[in-house]
Image: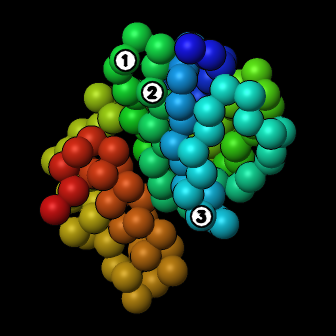
């Protein structure tokens, strides 16, 4: 089976890197599934979304990624997010509190709620 190199990087640090067999992400144009050998593509990630990486050892890595870009070459994928957090690192109680406290009547509050909901989906705790 073919592999590709995947890197998930946020402004402040590298989140994850390794070999993968599949990557799933949401862009502003819609969902994209990436296999090794994919056509070169540059896409803008949705503002509050999830990236899932299926590794070559059969496990999955899920990341809440907020804004940024997805760079795809036939050899690999680089996720360049403004901010990102591994699902295992997400504080579910804190994300729920942020979601519940967000004021949707304010554009910044609506964005904060969307980010909190993406974090909850990544952590498998969405209601």
Picture colour scheme: rainbow
Q: Earlier in the sequence, mark 3 or mark 2?
A: 3
Indicate whether 93 appears above or below 54: below
Disc 3 packing (10 Å; few <14; some 14–19; many ≥20):
few
Q: What residue is rendered at 62% in x and 58% in y?
A: 27
Q: What residue is rendered at 74% in x and 28% in y?
A: 37
Q: Visible in this render: residue 30? A: yes
Residue 101's quadrant in the figure?
bottom left
Residue linked to disc 3: 30
Pinpoint residue 26: horizontal percent, then vertical percent: 55, 55
Indicate whether 61 appears above or below 81: above
User: Do the CB atoms of the residues marked 3 and 2 lie less than 8 Å apart?
Assistant: no
| Mark 3 to mark 1 CA distance (whole Å) | 25 Å
**Helix, strand or loop at mark 3:** strand
The disc at residue 43 is none
Indicate left or right for 8 with 38 as reference.
left
**Helix, strand or loop at mark 1:** loop
* Quadrant containing the C terminus in the rendered view: bottom left
Residue 7's quadrant in the figure?
top right
Pinpoint residue 2: horizontal percent, then vertical percent: 62, 16
Indicate left or right for 120 with 2 as reference.
left
Q: What residue is rendered at 80% in x and 39% in y?
A: 39
Furthest toward the bottom, the residue is 105
| Mark 3 to mark 2 CA distance (whole Å) | 19 Å
The disc at residue 54 is 2
**Helix, strand or loop at mark 2:** strand
Residue linked to disc 1: 58
| Mark 1 to mark 2 CA distance (whole Å) | 7 Å
User: Do the CB atoms of the residues marked 1 and 2 lie less than 8 Å apart?
Assistant: yes
Pinpoint residue 82: horizontal percent, then vertical percent: 63, 45
Q: What residue is rendered at 61% in x and 16% in y?
A: 3
């Amino acid at each position: 089976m073919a592999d590709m190199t995947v890197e998930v990087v946020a402004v402040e640090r590298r989140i994850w890197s390794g070999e993968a067999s599949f990557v799933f992400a949401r862009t502003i144009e819609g969902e994209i599934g990436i296999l090794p050998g994919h056509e070169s593509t540059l896409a803008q990630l949705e503002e509050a979304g999830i990236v899932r990486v299926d590794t070559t050892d059969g496990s999955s890595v899920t990341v809440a990624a907020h804004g940024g870009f997805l760079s795809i070459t036939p050899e690999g994928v680089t996720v360049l997010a403004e901010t990102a957090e591994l699902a295992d690192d997400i504080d579910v109680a804190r994300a729920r509190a942020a979601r519940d406290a967000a004021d949707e009547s304010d554009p910044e509050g609506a964005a904060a709620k969307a980010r909190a909901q993406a974090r909850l989906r990544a952590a498998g705790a969405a209601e």
